[in-house]
Every structure is written in structure tokens, then in C-alpha cells.
Image: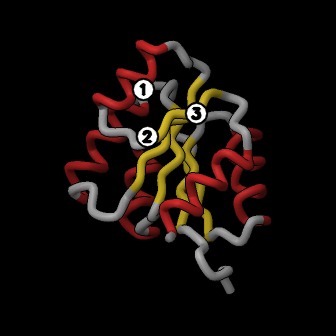
Amino acid sequence: MPATGAARVLVVDDNADSVAMLTMLLEMKGHVTAMAQSGPEALEKAETFRPDVVVLDIGLPGMDGYEVAGRLRQRFGGQGMTLVALTGWGSDEDRQRTREAGFHHHFTKPVDPEALQRVLEEIRT
């Protein structure tokens, strides 16, 4: 059973180790998780899983994180879904681009699990 204040988090990253590790850390914090390793898979999972939060790698092959974010906003209208960018790019320009793309938060890899946990706690209160 999920902990009080637990979020439903969809983790999307094309690196199998990264997605598995982050998913495991979130589950240890009591969150309910699902994972995807591509843009199309993320869109499909979002339909059935209905996440509160999507932690989304920007550098996905094929359909990048910006396109996935746009499609999620089109499908769900952003209702109750927080988009968190997870990327190796962290310049001011990169952060501006994620804001313009509709992301609520921007983390650079490797993500600080405690910083992500604080965001999830803010979302759930």
C-alpha cells in the first residue's frame, strides 16, 4: 500500500540502469512507480498508469523529451500532471528551454534523490 502523500511517478529514460535505479529509489520512498524507456512507451504507460508526476529524460532517441512533454500536455491538458525534466544539460538556456516546453522542474543527471523527493512532497501537499 502506498504511503500517505505518495505520488504516482512515471520515470522515462532510455538508459535501463538509470530508469531502474531511480524507480527503485522512488519506491523505497513509498511512491508508486512505472517506467518507460522510449517516448512512445511513455505515452502508452501514461494512458493506463495516470501519473501525478513524469520524470522525463530529455535526450531520448527518436521522440525526445520535449516532444513527449508536448504530447502529454495535449492528451491530458496538464491536469494534475507535473513534468520534471531529467537531463545532462543544465545551462541557463537549457533550463529556459524546459520551462518553455512546459516542464515544472529541471534536474541534471545524476539527480539528487533528496531534491526530487522534496519536489514530490511539495506536489502531494
Q: CA distance from mark 1 to mark 3?
A: 21 Å
Classify mark 1: helix, strand or loop.
loop
Depth check: 21 or 109 in front? 109
The residues tagged by marks 2 and 1 sit, at their Cα atoms, a distance apart of: 8 Å
Q: What residue lies at 27% left-to-right and 55% top-to-bottom?
A: 78
Name the residue at 30% across, 32% down: 101
Q: Quadrant of residue 69?
A: top left
Give the CA distance from mark 2 to mark 3: 19 Å
**Residue 62 - label:** 1
Measuring 58% from the left and 50% from the top, which residue is drawn there?
Answer: 11
Q: Is residue 27 left or right of residue 82?
A: right
**Marks 2 and 1 close (CB-CB < 8 Å):** yes
Q: Position of residue 17 (x, y in %)?
A: 77, 40
Viewport quadrant of the N terminus:
bottom right
Observer-side mark, 2 or 3, equals 3
* Camera-side residue of 86 and 72: 86
Q: Position of residue 64 (x, y in %)?
A: 41, 28
Q: Residue furthest bottom?
A: 1
* Residue 107, disc: 3
Q: Earlier in the sequence, mark 2 or mark 3?
A: 2
At horizontal 67% and vertical 45% (from top left) the residue drawn is 115
Q: Which mark is residue 41?
A: none
Mark nearer the viewer, 1 or 3: 3
- Disc 2 residue crowd, few under 14, some 14–19, many 20+, Cα 10 Å: many
